[in-house]
Image (cartoon, helix red, strand yellow):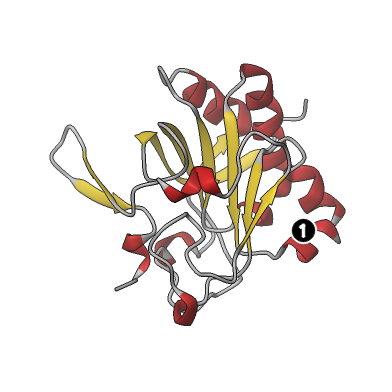
Amino acid sequence: MAVTAWQVHATLSRSAANGPGTRFVVWTQGCSLGCEGCFNPETHDAGGTARTAEDVAAEALRTPDAEGVTVSGGEPLEQPAPLREFCALIRPSGLGIVVLSGFSRAEIEENPDRLAAVQDADMVIAGRYNPRLHLGTGLRGSSNKEYWAITSRYSADDFAAVPEIEIVISADGTFSMTGMHAWGGP
């Protein structure tokens, strides 16, 4: 497998607000889609920390009792090669894989690189965020976004119980918020 640099904004070893069960989360760096009201504009510019899919996968696989991994952004599908590598490395472990993308399902399906990047995912949540259609639940962000089940591991119902917000306090006392309610909703 090729070793491709992956621009990563951050990782979180344990989250309950980024998919069903306890999850390892990767936020990629870089997004050119410019969705109005995006909750994470600090992930839009190029940059981030250059890592490899192998390195991030090894970190994810060290997370005890995780149900799965979630890849968000930025826009993960603007870096399709390392996303594909990451998902291929995670797939044999039995962990569930969720990818959140601003690209629509049609935009993913019509681009061979994007489509290959999600071939090992279980669920893709696809579509541009629309603040006028904001949802505080289910990880879609807005009602126009689509649950696209690549496998039968997850259904839309599995995302209904995901907490709307999560506050993470680090060992150094800093904190961050994650989850759909944190995305600028009411």
Left or right of 104 on screen, residue 42: left
- 106 or 38: which is nearer to us? 106
Q: Is residue 57 visible?
A: yes
**Looking at this rendering, what residue extends furthest in the bottom direction?**
132
For image coordinates 53% across by 30% down, the residue present is 56
How many numbered discs, if any?
1
For image coordinates 62% across by 20% down, the residue present is 94
Residue 58 percent coordinates (x, y) = 53, 21
Judging from the image, what secondary structure is the residue with disc 1 in? helix
Left or right of 143 on screen, residue 24: left
**Looking at this rendering, what residue extends furthest in the front direction?**
157
- 51 or 147: which is nearer to us? 147
Residue 89 percent coordinates (x, y) = 67, 25
Left or right of 112 on screen, residue 44: left
Q: Can you say whether 37 is above or below 3 in the image? A: below
Residue 150 percent coordinates (x, y) = 73, 43
For image coordinates 86% across by 61% down, the residue present is 110
Q: Which residue is mark 1?
A: 108
Q: Is residue 49 visible?
A: no
Please tell me how crowded label 1 is: few (under 14), some (14-19), or many (20+) other residues with Cα within 10 Å: many
- 43 or 67: which is nearer to us? 67
Left or right of 47 on screen, residue 127: right
Viewport quadrant of the C terminus: bottom left
Viewport quadrant of the N terminus: top right
What amino acid type is highlighted by mark number 1? Answer: Ile
- 114 or 78: which is nearer to us? 114
Residue 71, by quadrant, is: top right
For image coordinates 32% across by 61% down, the residue present is 182
Residue 123, by quadrant, is: top right
